[in-house]
Image (cartoon, helix red, strand yellow):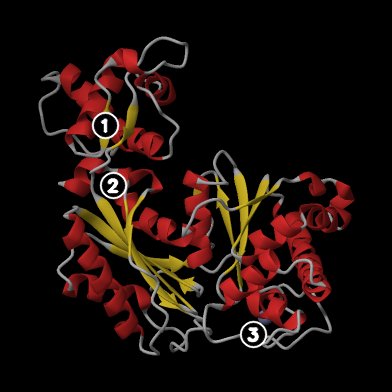
Amino acid sequence: MSGKADPRPAGEGTTSRTRLDRGRGALGPALELVHTGRAPTRAVLTAELGVTRATAGAVAAELEALGLIRVDARPGAAAGSQGRPSHRLSVAEDGPVALAAQVHADGFRAALVGLGGRTVATTPGCEAVDADPAKVLGSVVAAGAELLRETGRRCVGAGLAVPSAVAEPEGLALNPLHLAWPAGAPVREIFAEQVRAAGLPGPAFAANDVNLAALAEHRHGAGRGSRDLLCVATGHRGVGGALVLDGRLHSGSSGLALEVGHLAVNPEGRPCHCGSRGCLDVEADPLALLTAAGRAPGPEMSLLKQADDLIRGQYDDPAVRTATETLIDRLGLGLAGLVNILNPDRIILGGLHRTLLEADPDRLRAVVADRSLWGRSGGVPILACTLEHNSLVGAAELAWQPVLDDPLAALA
Ligand SMILES: [Zn+2]
């Protein structure tokens, strides 16, 4: 809580004020516990917050009054942590939502995402991205605004996922190379302008798509319970990485940490747009797989889907199998380097990397183990991302964060 001086005379209302302050300070942590599924009952909430049952009850009631959670009033309906009946807690099914937007090399999509990472509505993916960021972001915000009108939901804010490093504090998309956007485009400001122009309330945020995928998976998916979570994923093009430390995204001093796409994994490999050659970005993404398998990329669907379909549907084809193994080896080499530097307790893989893992998990784990420090870090679990549209869910997390930090202030 803040250290502001209290204007009231000493002694006046101290006890009730202290209880109120403590309760208010617990609102955010309590909401985060319900949001991330770690407090399914009021008994667990009480234990996790370390407060009295009365305080936990007041906090849950306040969150329910704000329309954020539901408290099952029938105490017999669910068992508590010690087998005692306890009120069941869940996010409100009809509560507010965040507007989430994602732009990638093969299109864009908008969604409404409630607490708990629950996607309430999505637009179909659109498949053309204009070279002018304002046009694309205007279209995606308009699509999101239409979803809000259709559903009648209250909006807490908006978040945008982009396939580029986003420099902070300005919110500049530094390298949107697969989008034909100008390098350094002020995407957060452009997005915020479009959100305001559409008459939508709340703040607007923007961040790198793989960072957001990692945040979403940590809170709601394959990363739950991890302390040092490394996420590596292909977007539709290129390769990104992210690290979640103690529940917070580690984005570095200016938002540019974990640009793992430019680790060299093939010294004789193809030239990369960064100026080097053989980078993970160009050696282990969907286009690299199609090329290695001798397939010409078709224009009819996204490269990610084409590469995914090839592995899932034609793995018996020797050329496809060899190409898949080649990419697994390159990915494993990159992961081993990252594991040796970062010492994560879990690795999660998204996009095409998830498909590579599922195609031959033993091979990938063996490559990482072979090259890890003293064979020790080879034991780190490597799992597939589990959330559908995890970058969109992560974009919504940005918009939810002020509510999670201070529900009363954010919804006032
Ligand atoms: Zn590179």
Q: Element type at marker 1? A: strand
**Image check: 34 left or right of 217?**
left
| Image quadrant assignment for residue 379 | top right
Q: CA distance from mark 2 to mark 1?
A: 16 Å
* Amino acid found under the numbered disc labelled 1: Arg
Q: Residue at x 57, y 65 (%)?
A: 257
Judging by the rendered image, the residue that carries numbered circle 2 is 403
Residue occupied by mark 3: 274
Instruction: Decide if residue 82 is on the left or right side of residue 68.
Output: right
Q: Earlier in the sequence, mark 2 or mark 1?
A: 1
Please state the quadrant of the image where ligand 1 appears: bottom right
Residue closest to the eye, 189 or 310: 310
Ligand 1 within 8 Å of the CB at mark 3 = yes
CA separation, marks 2 and 3?
Answer: 38 Å
Whether residue 52 can be seen here: no
Q: Nearer the viewer, residue 409 or 130?
A: 130
Amino acid type assigned to the residue bearing label 2 in the image: Val
Give the residue displayed 61% in from the left and 49% down from the top: 229
Element under disc 2: helix
Determine the residue positioned at 18% across, 72% down. Answer: 198
Residue occupied by mark 1: 70
